[in-house]
Image (spheres, rainbow, N blue to C red):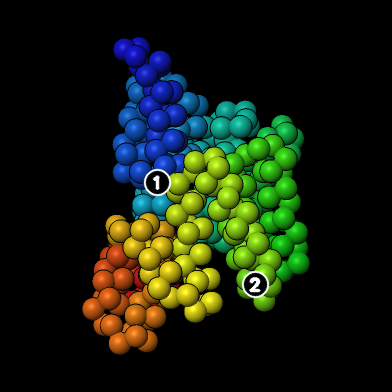
Amino acid sequence: ADDPLERAPLLERAGELALAGDELDLAAGRLEEARALYTEAGSTHDAARAAVPLSTTLWALGRPDDAIALAESALEALANDEPDEDIAQLAAEAARVHFFRGELETAMERVEQALEIAEAQRLPAVLSQALNTKSLIIQGRPRESRALMREALEVALEHDLVEAALRAYNNLAVVEWDADRPAEARRLIADAFDLARRRGHRHYLMSFAAWQCLFLLLDGDWDEAFALADELFAQPSANAIIVDAHNWLAAAALERGNADEARRRFDLVAPEVETSTDLQLRSGGLMR
C-alpha cells in the first residue's frame, strides 16, 4: 500500500500478529512505523490505539519505562476527547504497567477509568483486561481478587477474546497456586496451553511451556524439563515466568553438580532484568 492511511493499519495488524508469534523486535518495529504514519496523517485516535499493542510489546521486551511513557503520552493526547474504546484500552494498558512498576494508586485510577468506559459502552475486551488488572491490584483481599480474575476469564471466553483469555488463565493459575490449590492451577495451565496452541498464540504458549517446566521439575521429571526448555527457550528472555523457569532449572542443575549448566541457564536471563522497574521481573533477575 502506498497511501499512509492504508499502509498504517496493515502494519498495525502485522505488529499485533508478530507479538502473538513472539517475534517481539519485529512487532515493535511494525507498530512504531504504524504509529508514525498515523501521527503524520493527523489520525490521533488511530495512533493512540496502536500504542496499546506497542506498549504491551515494549513491556514484554523488558522495557516497562518505555511502555508506560508511551501509554501515558497517548492518553494525554486524547485527554480532551470524549471517552471511547481507544481511551479505555489505553487506560487499561497503563494500569497494567503501573501495577508491575509497583505504582498501585495510579494503577487503580487508570483501571477504574477503563472499567467505567468499558461497562458503559459494553467493551468486553477492555472489561476483561481491566478486571484482570484490578484483581492483581487488590490481592490483599484474596476472595474478591479471585472473583474478579474468574470474571475476567469468563468474559474473555464468552466473547472469544484469545489474548485476554490467555492472560486471565495465566494470572488465575497464579492465584490458585498461591492459594495452595496446585491441581486447579495445573488444570488451568493445561487448558491455556491447549487454547494457545490451537489459536496460534506463541507468545503465551511460551509462558505456559515455562509453567510446564516448573511442573516437571516438581514432579521429578528433570530430564524432560531440561529437554522442553532446550527446545523452546534458546534466546535470552525478559519474560518473567521464563526467567523463573531458568532459575529453577539452574537450581536443578546445581543439585546435579553441573555448575556449567546452571551458568548457561542464568545467561539466558536477559541482563537488564536486574535493574528493571518491573518489580516482578527484577525479583526474578536478582535470584540469579
Three-letter code for the amino acid on which mark 1 is drawn = Asp
Q: Secondary structure at mark 1?
A: loop
**Can residue 203 be seen from the camera position used here?**
yes
Type of amino acid at the residue the image marks with label 2: Pro
Q: Which mark is residue 204?
A: none
Residue 24 in picture, x, y percent from top left: 36, 45
Q: Position of residue 150 (x, y in %)?
A: 72, 55
Q: Is residue 253 above or below residue 50?
A: below
Which image quadrant for residue 225? bottom left
Which of 210 and 274 lies nearest the eye of the viewer? Answer: 210
**Residue depicted at x 27% and y 76%:** 261
- Residue placed farthest to the left in the image? 260
CA gap between label 1 and label 2 equals: 27 Å
Give the labeled residue for mark 2: 182
Residue 22 tag number = 1
Tell me: 89 left or right of 117.
left
Query: First in sequence: mark 1 or mark 2?
Result: 1
Q: Nearer the viewer, residue 205 or 169?
A: 205
Tell me if 16 is positioned left or right of 166 in this view. left
Please report the residue visible at 40 percent of the width from the left and 30 percent of the height from the top: 14
Residue at (40, 46) in percent of width and height: 22
Residue 265 left/right relative to 77: left
Q: Quadrant of the N terminus?
A: top left
Total number of numbered discs in the rendering: 2
Image location (x, y in percent) of residue 70: 41, 43
> Are there few (<14), some (14-19), or many (20+) residues within 10 Å of tag 2?
some
Picture layout, residue 159 above or below residue 236: above
At x 54%, y 35%, the residue is 79
Q: Does residue 72 appear in this view? A: no
